[in-house]
Image (tube, grey):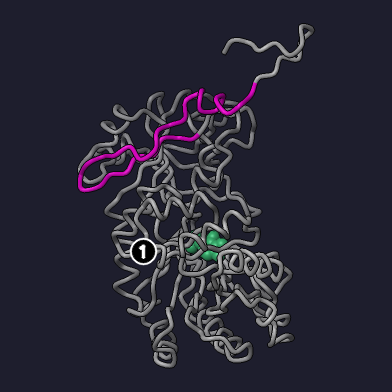
């Protein structure tokens, strides 16, 4: 059996002929399944806000919205993406430690559901911009709690951070809201980290977050209309990791959420999810350009690398761990040994995989890095060596759609201004 990979009945060979490589390939059915499962299994009062940071493509956002996702955004472009994807302003949260005045103003003008505020200085800015508009701004406080998450790839809470306001600073000044007359505090957000793969850790975090939110709202005397428990649901990438069992998570989380929901019948309960919604739906597709050996080790040089998929180098871990690889053009063929998978960049760091068990590779073979739908191109140095952004293709209802074209050289050159500093001075050169 040496079948090629198919997505909704479409062969990878067809897609490669049509779109060329490299590209990101997304399975729309998987995206719909992920948001559908979350909504079906979690307590009905728990709303899922899609963190666009994980994958800011407007069509991905639109598909998730059709599945019932709201949006959590952190920049002007992400805000406009969510709006263009059809997310209602009342279902958008804006968050981030360094919001610009323009971003805050846009939130007020578009009337997003709430700004999640991360510092006293930001409260001042929001207050001033709301005053200019003769409005009151709805604001949730992002809190840096005294406790931290366990077992997370990236830990927040319990240490000095640029995110949120320390729990202790808020409790020390229960009357602080009076300083900001044009701000209406109405919620609490806490995010404890990403890549959480333990159901119990999510449940424990949620319980502690909801408890802290209640105590804070009471102490600072604001109505708890929004309790945002962050999220950080992980997916397994590496050997030895296990995916979250959503049914188990739901069973253990529901009593915690239900108790809170009962105490706060009017409150919106929010879970943010980025990676969980998009990671498994995406494959990074490259072609093998050259096959070579060096000092007894085998290398495949592909037409795309860490410039498109920085996460594959395994940032944040000391031991090199490979993302799951698959030879997409001959799926059934057994591995014949170890390969290093290198990209086209002129740096030894451009290695997508080290000692990956794969069949004998040939020029033209199509390789896939699986589970790559989150933190792909937007979290990679796509302009390094000026290769630009890769194409993105979404298969939906059995049809492939180009949802982002690959950058052309002019996309990189176009925004630059050429000044000629040669002996003739200041002479504009023909383009
Ligand atoms: C990055 C981020 C998310 C998304 O995290 P995932 O692990 O991808 O789900 C959610 N909320 C905040 C505040 C974030 O910074």
Percent coordinates x, y for residue 46 in the rendering: 39, 77
Q: Which residues are magenta?
A: 389-417
Instruction: Determine if the magenta segment contains residue 1.
Output: no
Tally the marks: 1
Residue at (51% x, 42% y) in the render: 309
Check disc 1 and report the residue beneath it. 69
Q: Secondary structure at mark 1?
A: loop
Percent coordinates x, y for residue 429 in the rendering: 63, 11
Camera-side residue of 250 and 382: 382
- Image quarter of the N terminus: top left
In the rendered image, the vertical position of residue 162 relative to residue 366, given as above or below:
below
Q: Residue furthest right?
A: 423
Percent coordinates x, y for residue 181 in the rendering: 63, 78
Label 1 CA crowd tier, 10 Å (few <14, some 14–19, many 20+): many
Instruction: Determine if the magenta segment contains residue 405.
Output: yes
Camera-side residue of 219 and 11: 219
In the rendered image, the vertical position of residue 113 relative to residue 408, given as above or below:
below
Q: What is the quadrant of residue 398 in the picture?
A: top left
């Amino acid at each position: 059996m040496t079948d090629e990979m198919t997505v909704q009945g479409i062969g990878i060979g067809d897609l490669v002929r049509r779109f060329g490589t490299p590209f990101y390939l997304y399975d729309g059915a998987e995206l719909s399944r992920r948001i559908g499962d979350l909504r079906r299994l979690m307590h009905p009062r728990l709303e899922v806000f899609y963190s666009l940071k994980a994958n800011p493509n407007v069509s991905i956002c639109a598909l998730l919205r059709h599945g019932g996702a709201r949006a959590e955004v952190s920049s002007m472009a992400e805000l406009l993406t969510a709006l263009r994807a059809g997310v209602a302003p009342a279902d958008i949260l804006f968050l981030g430690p360094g919001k610009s005045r323009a971003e805050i103003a846009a939130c007020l003008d578009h009337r997003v559901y709430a700004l999640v505020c991360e510092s006293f200085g930001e409260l001042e800015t929001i207050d001033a911009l709301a005053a200019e508009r003769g409005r009151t701004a709805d604001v949730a406080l992002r809190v840096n709690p005294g406790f931290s998450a366990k077992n997370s790839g990236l830990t927040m809470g319990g240490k000095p951070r640029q995110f949120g306001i320390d729990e202790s600073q808020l409790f020390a000044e229960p009357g602080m809201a009076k300083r900001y007359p044009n701000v209406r505090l109405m919620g609490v957000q806490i995010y404890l980290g990403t890549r959480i793969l333990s159901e119990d850790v999510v449940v424990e975090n949620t319980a502690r977050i909801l408890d802290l939110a209640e105590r804070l709202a009471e102490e600072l005397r604001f109505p708890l209309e929004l309790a945002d428990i962050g999220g950080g649901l992980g997916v397994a990438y590496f050997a030895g990791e296990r995916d979250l069992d959503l049914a188990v998570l739901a069973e253990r989380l529901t009593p915690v959420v239900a108790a809170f929901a009962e105490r706060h019948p009017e409150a919106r309960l929010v879970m943010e999810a980025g990676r969980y919604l998009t990671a498994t739906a995406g494959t990074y597709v490259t072609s093998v350009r050259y096959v070579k050996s060096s000092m007894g080790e085998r290398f495949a040089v592909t037409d795309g690398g860490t410039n498109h998929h920085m996460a594959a180098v395994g940032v944040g871990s000391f031991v090199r761990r490979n993302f799951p690889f698959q030879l997409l053009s001959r799926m059934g063929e057994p591995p014949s040994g170890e390969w290093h998978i290198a990209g086209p960049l002129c740096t030894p760091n451009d290695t997508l995989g080290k000692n990956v068990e794969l069949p004998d590779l040939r020029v033209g073979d199509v390789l896939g890095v699986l589970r790559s739908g989150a933190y792909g191109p937007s979290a990679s140095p796509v302009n390094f060596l000026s290769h630009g952004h890769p194409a993105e293709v979404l298969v939906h209802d059995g049809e492939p759609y180009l949802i982002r074209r690959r950058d052309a050289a002019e996309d990189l050159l176009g925004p630059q201004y050429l000044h000629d500093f040669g002996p003739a001075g200041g002479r504009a050169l023909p383009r």
